[in-house]
């Protein structure tokens, strides 16, 4: 009798136990804003609202599933996932499909996949596992090995060439190293070395990459070429003013002045229609998301989960910052979607995968302590 | 030891956690700084720079598209349309939007017929125009061609079909020297527009009057450009119209010209070169302004094709020259009535005063020959005009002196631009001491010799006037000394209010001639057409008319008797005739010139007869021939 009465309650608990309400609410809010913006960006023709809604559903399901997996179990996946990721990247390097001069995709029969996306999660997972494993006796060589683990996929992705994604993967790995206690002098040393190497790296960059950086410095230098995106998106943002032109009223958006308006440049659409008020709201939402992630990281019970949570959280921040910085013209144009806002299934799934891990870390904490 | 180790490990873990949280805190600060940076950027763009970007967005969004007004229509005095507009499809290329022009045109030509001359014209237009303009490669597309291109449009970025208004001159060559033509705006036209401060009004206009009335009345015909505020998308395609300021069509011109008369006159010339100007003496309105050969102004409208242009340019008959206002010719004997009037007005002769004509005039041992061997005998003023006696005028010129002649002829407008309302007038030459001083450089050339005055008296020598000037002088005499500025446009009709504004309603000169003197001259000129050199041409006319024949030497024969047949056609004399009719109340006055036509009575007078008959009676004289071979009179 009692058991039967408890059934719905148990079922409910079984479903929601491992979700983190604050994280979920913040994410759903941003997703809601994102859906409205995707609608605005695409309703003129080729409406993507339903497609994005489905993407979100799938992503949330992935999030829920990940939240059920305890961190200890997750650790088991770290090494295989990383190795598979690297192998796929090598395959891309060898047999990848060339699109727009970049070899990023791999044909796996049924569909095409972009292995670099896997690395966004596999990288912090691997490094967090690695540091966790040698937690008790961390020495310099561990950092060196970790650095190698970081550099290999980074190099493969950068070589595709996809500098944007490479930097994001590198950042995710670096955050693990940073939280794992990589010494300041080494960090500063690398920064200094990077500064010195910059002119040499410049020569290694592809023409389009150089152009993007030059465009950032002076977008008007090539107003019809690579500067066009940035000029138009800053016009969109600036013309939005303090309160925006109103939903569906953005002229830059609806007259097609904003390129890639439902994907990488969706922030320009949002910003034009909602103005500084809207931007501030969005910044606060991301801040809350990052804040909650940091709280989860701070309270995580193992080194693995701390490092992983920290890295995932800072990665979320990085995506948001790089995207908004790019669209508003203070960062070079790199193909980074705005988390939970930009249209696109893959990015959403990867992001929600991260969120699921964060939730898992948060909700399995007690069990570990017990 | 184990416990201690355990403790250490614990301690170690604690310090690890502490360090982790410190770094987390550090990251949180970094995140805050980064987001503050973003906020600052947004604040900069959306608050401080908002006006700038709002303007940029509007500039992006809104494009002012000029709406070209319809050019004014030109009709003759009876309402016959001489210049109008019609709509046609053209295939146009904007060179700046096409990557490989040659290849695009090549591909296009596989779809729509593009001839070599189309390409040549396109090249020429492209050289003349700004890069961002769209330039026609083909005009007057058929519906089928339009459909064909529309289906393949995506393949040709920067190329489009446009509906354009084209200028059309329905009468073709008729009146082309008066009407002129329009062509595409060039740099010189742009300067004109700029000087008139009409740049704004000419946005979107790509044609401009190049000659004739089209040029002179360009600003009246053009109209006021309207504007459409169009919302455009990033591809420059119009999304919707926001507002429209309708253009004001150009004003229409009603001419004094009579298109039928003009056509008849042009026909009367046949293949001969020459000019005719017919004026309504009471108003100064030009009834016909002919310069032969003519040209077809329709060929110029969308850029003349190179071969057409070459044909006009290499034609030895120079069809593009407006002989009526630009060509200058010695007036020959048509000068005599004016000389006679001068004699009366200055008191040098009375009508009755006679001279004895031995067939020559001796001046300083040189014989100035009369055309009639043996002379006309006793000659008074009437006879001197009717039979065109040279000796009478040799003597008269000698008696008057060059300054008196120049002063008098100046009053009649000879040797001056008349101020007719088309460009390209010549001044002509009214010889005088002052003129010679201006004309020549060397002092011995600058001096006026009395002997030079003699042949001035019969309209030869330095004398050189445009047919228009001769017609105006004739009209002024016919109108009893009241002179109007000759004009082709009667009035301009305001396209909005329908208001008519007359072009030249007031006379410019009232010459203080004695009416009795004028009557003497008119009577003598009537005598010319009755019993004199114009008698044959005007035989059987249903009205009384006055006239005077003239022959202008092209080639100096040095004492030899001129025989038309022996001289090459191009060296034959020019034939002239001036006339007015009806004699009592002239409705038409004219001057005819037939280049190398020989005697005026032979080739020029019959044309005058046809024109006057047609104008006054609405029909042509019976058995009208364009050239009257039998009219040759030895004593002209």
Image (spheres, coloured by chain):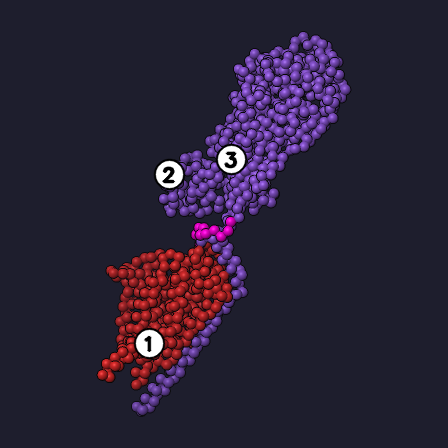
**Residue ID for mark 3:** B84
Task: Name the residue nearer the viewer: A50 or B574.
Answer: A50
Q: Is residue A346 left or right of residue B525?
A: left
Colour of the chain lettered B: purple
The correct choice, above or below, for B552 with respect to A328 in the image is above
For image coordinates 63% across by 35% down, the residue present is: B502
For image coordinates 33% across by 67% down, the residue present is: A56
Q: Residue furthest toward the right?
A: B347
Disc number placed over residue B144 in the picture, else none:
2
Which label sits in the foreground, 3 or 1?
A: 3
Mark 3 packing: few (<14 Cα in 10 Å), some, or many (20+)? some
Residue B236 falls within the magenta-colored stretch:
yes
**Residue ID for mark 1:** A19
Dot 3 and dot 1 residues touching (CB under 8 Å): no
Q: Is residue A14 visible?
A: no
Dot 2 and dot 3 residues touching (CB under 8 Å): no
Residues flagged by tags 2 and 1 on a common chain: no
The residue marked by circle 3 belongs to what chain? B
Mark 2 or mark 3: name the one nearer the start of the chain: 3
Counting from the top left corner in percent of width and height, residue B173 is at 51, 28
For image coordinates 43% across by 56% down, the residue present is: A256
Q: Give the overall secondary structure of the magenta segment.
A: strand
The residue marked by circle 2 belongs to what chain? B
Q: Secondary structure at mark 2?
A: helix
**Quarter of the rendering occupied by the C terminus of chain B:** top right
**Quarter of the rendering occupied by the N terminus of chain B:** bottom left
Colour of the chain lettered A: red
Tally of numbered discs:
3
Q: CA distance from mark 3 to mark 1?
A: 80 Å
Numbered range of the magenta stretch: B234-244
Counting from the top left corner in percent of width and height, residue A299 is at 37, 81
Task: Name the residue nearer the viewer: B586 or A127.
Answer: B586
């Amino acid at each position: 009798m009692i058991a039967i009465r408890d059934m719905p309650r148990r079922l409910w608990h079984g479903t929601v136990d491992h979700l983190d309400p604050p994280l979920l609410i913040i994410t759903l809010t941003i997703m809601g804003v994102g859906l409205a913006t995707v609608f605005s960006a695409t309703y003129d023709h080729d409406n993507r609202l339903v497609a994005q809604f489905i993407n979100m559903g799938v992503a949330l399901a992935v999030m829920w599933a990940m939240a059920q997996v305890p961190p200890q179990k997750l650790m088991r996946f770290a090494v295989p996932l990383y190795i598979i990721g690297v192998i796929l990247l090598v395959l891309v390097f060898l047999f990848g499909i060339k699109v727009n001069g970049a070899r990023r995709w791999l044909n796996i029969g049924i569909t095409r996949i972009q292995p670099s996306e896997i690395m966004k999660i596999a990288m912090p997972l691997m490094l967090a596992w690695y540091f966790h494993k040698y937690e008790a006796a961390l020495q310099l060589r561990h950092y060196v090995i970790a650095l190698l683990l970081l550099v290999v996929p980074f190099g493969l992705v950068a070589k595709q060439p996809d500098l944007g994604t490479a930097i994001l993967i590198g950042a995710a790995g670096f955050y693990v190293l940073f939280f794992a206690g990589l010494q300041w002098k080494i960090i500063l040393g690398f920064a200094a070395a990077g500064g010195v190497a910059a002119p040499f790296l410049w020569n290694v960059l592809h023409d389009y990459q150089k152009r993007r950086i030059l465009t950032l410095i002076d977008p008007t230098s090539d107003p019809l070429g690579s500067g066009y995106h940035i000029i138009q998106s800053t016009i969109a943002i600036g013309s939005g003013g303090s309160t925006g032109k109103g939903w569906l009223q953005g002229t830059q958006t609806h007259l097609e002045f904003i390129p890639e308006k439902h994907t990488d440049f969706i922030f320009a659409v949002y910003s034009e229609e909602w103005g500084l008020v809207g931007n501030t709201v969005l910044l606060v939402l991301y801040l809350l998301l990052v804040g909650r992630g940091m709280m989860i990281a701070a309270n995580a019970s193992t080194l693995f989960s701390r490092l992983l949570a920290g890295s995932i959280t800072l990665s979320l921040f990085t995506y948001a910052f790089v995207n908004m910085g790019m669209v508003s013209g203070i960062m070079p144009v790199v193909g980074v979607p705005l988390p939970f806002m930009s249209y696109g299934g893959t990015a959403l799934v990867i992001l929600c995968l991260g969120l699921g891990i964060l939730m898992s870390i948060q909700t399995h904490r007690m069990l570990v302590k017990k | 030891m184990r416990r201690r180790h355990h403790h250490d490990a614990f301690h170690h873990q604690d310090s690890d956690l502490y360090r982790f949280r410190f770094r987390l805190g550090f990251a949180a600060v970094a995140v805050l700084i980064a987001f503050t940076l973003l906020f600052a950027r947004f604040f900069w763009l959306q608050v401080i720079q908002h006006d700038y970007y709002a303007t940029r967005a509007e500039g992006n969004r809104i494009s002012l598209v000029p709406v070209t007004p319809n050019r004014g229509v030109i009709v003759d005095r009876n309402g016959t349309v001489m210049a109008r507009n019609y709509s046609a499809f053209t295939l146009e290329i904007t060179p700046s939007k096409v990557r490989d022009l040659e290849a695009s045109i090549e591909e296009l030509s596989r779809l729509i017929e593009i001839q070599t001359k189309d390409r040549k014209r396109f090249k020429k237009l492209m050289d003349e125009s700004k890069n961002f303009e769209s330039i026609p490669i083909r005009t007057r597309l058929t519906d089928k061609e339009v459909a064909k291109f529309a289906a393949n449009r995506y393949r040709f970025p920067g190329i489009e079909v446009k509906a354009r208004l084209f200028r059309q001159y329905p009468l073709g060559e008729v009146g082309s020297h008066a009407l002129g033509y329009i062509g595409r705006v060039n740099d010189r036209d742009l300067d004109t527009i700029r000087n008139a401060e009409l740049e704004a009004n000419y946005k979107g206009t790509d044609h401009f009057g190049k000659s004739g009335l089209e040029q002179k009345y360009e600003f009246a015909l053009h109209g006021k450009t309207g504007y459409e505020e169009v919302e455009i998308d990033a591809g420059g395609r119009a999304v919707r119209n926001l507002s429209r300021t309708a253009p004001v069509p150009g004003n229409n011109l009603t001419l004094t010209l009579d298109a039928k008369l003009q056509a008849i006159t042009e026909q009367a010339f046949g293949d001969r070169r020459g000019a005719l100007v017919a004026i309504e003496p009471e108003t100064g309105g030009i009834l016909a302004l002919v310069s032969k050969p003519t040209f077809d102004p329709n060929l110029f409208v969308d850029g003349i094709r190179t071969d057409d242009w070459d044909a006009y340019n290499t034609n030895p008959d120079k069809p593009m020259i407006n002989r009526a206002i630009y060509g200058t010719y010695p007036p020959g004997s048509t000068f005599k009535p004016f000389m006679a009037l001068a004699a009366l007005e200055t008191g040098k002769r009375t009508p009755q005063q006679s001279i004895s004509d031995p067939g020559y005039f001796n001046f300083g041992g040189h014989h100035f020959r009369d055309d009639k061997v043996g002379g006309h005998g006793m000659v008074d003023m009437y006879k001197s005009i009717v039979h065109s006696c040279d000796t009478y005028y040799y003597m008269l010129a000698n008696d008057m002196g060059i300054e008196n002649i120049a002063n008098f002829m100046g009053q009649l407008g000879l040797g001056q631009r008349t101020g007719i309302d088309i460009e390209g007038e010549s001044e002509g030459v009214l010889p005088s001491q002052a003129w010679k001083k201006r004309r020549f450089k060397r002092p011995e050339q600058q001096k006026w010799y009395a002997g030079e005055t003699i042949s001035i008296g019969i309209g030869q020598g330095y004398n050189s006037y445009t047919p228009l000037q001769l017609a105006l002088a004739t009209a002024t005499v016919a109108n009893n000394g009241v002179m109007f500025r000759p004009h082709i446009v009667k009035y301009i009709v305001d396209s909005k209010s329908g208001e008519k504004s007359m072009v030249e309603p007031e006379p410019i000169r009232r010459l203080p001639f004695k009416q009795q003197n004028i009557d003497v001259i008119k009577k003598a000129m009537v005598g010319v057409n009755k019993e004199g050199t114009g008698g044959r041409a005007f035989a059987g006319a249903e009205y009384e008319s006055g006239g005077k024949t003239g022959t202008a030497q092209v080639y100096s024969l040095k004492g030899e008797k001129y025989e038309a047949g022996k001289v090459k056609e191009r060296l034959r004399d020019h034939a002239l005739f001036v006339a007015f009719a009806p004699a009592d109340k002239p409705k038409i006055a004219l001057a005819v010139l037939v280049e190398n036509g020989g005697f005026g009575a032979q080739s020029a007078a019959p044309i005058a007869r046809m024109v006057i008959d047609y104008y006054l009676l609405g029909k042509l004289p019976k058995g009208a021939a364009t050239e009257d071979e039998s009219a040759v009179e030895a004593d002209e």
